[in-house]
Image (spheres, rainbow, N blue to C red):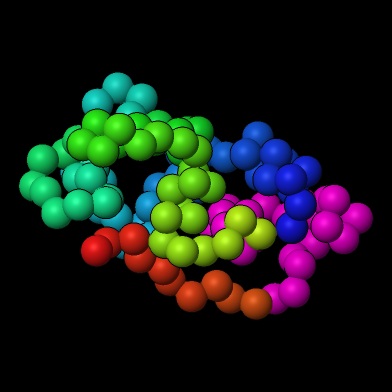
Amino acid sequence: MTLHDAQEVRTRLNERIVEDVLQHLGIDRLQSGGPDNWLVSMYRRDSNPDCSVHRETGVFSDLATGDSGDIFKLVMKANVSFPETIELVAKIGGIYPTANNGAGKPMDGRVMPPVSIRR
């Protein structure tokens, strides 16, 4: 997977895909507020929803740690490489980047195992 693939996947994100990626990571949405889902911080044990994830773009901001980034950075927190992260988000969303094989078809049929960033 390439940077071009990441850009293509990023432009095709939607609320369903972001929600499915969060579920795949074992993250439960606690509260909805405007365009964001509020979650308990993924990086430390806490009971307050202090991390927001934009429903459509997957951009997150963890107020407890000051960390922020896109959906790819969030998945990579589970010790998943960047190419695997792009592939995982694409497969969850049913997105098949055309740059990888020129036809927009599934890359190799592998199923990515669930990952978790809970500590």
Q: Is residue 113 above or below residue 66?
A: below
Can you name the residue that lies furthest to the top here? 34
Foreground residue among 79 and 102:
79
Above-or-below relation of 107 to 5: below
Q: Which residue is drawn at the image coordinates 49% and 46% (left, top)?
A: 73
Above or below, comparing residue 96 to residue 15 in the picture: below
Q: With 53 as the anchor, is 110 left or right in this view?
A: right
Q: Quadrant of residue 13?
A: top right
Q: Is residue 37 visible?
A: no
- The residue shown at (30%, 32%) is 66
Question: Which image quadrant is residue 83 in?
Answer: bottom right
In the rendered image, residue 52, in percent from the top left (x then y), is placed at 30, 33
Q: Is residue 66 magenta?
A: no
Q: Is residue 29 visible?
A: yes
| Residue 27 drawn at (x, y percent) | 29, 55
The answer to whether 53 appears left or right of 84 in the picture is left
Q: Which residues are magenta?
A: 84-109
Q: Quadrant of residue 26?
A: bottom left
Write the residue at 21% across / 36% down.
Answer: 64
**Horizontal and vertical percent for residue 86?**
63, 54
Toward the viewer: 101 or 46?
Answer: 46
Nearer-the-camera pick, 29 or 118: 118
The N terminus - image quarter: bottom right
Residue 87 spot, x, y in % from top left: 64, 60
| Residue located farthest toward the right when viewing the structure as drawn | 102
Q: Residue at x 91, y 55 (%)?
A: 102
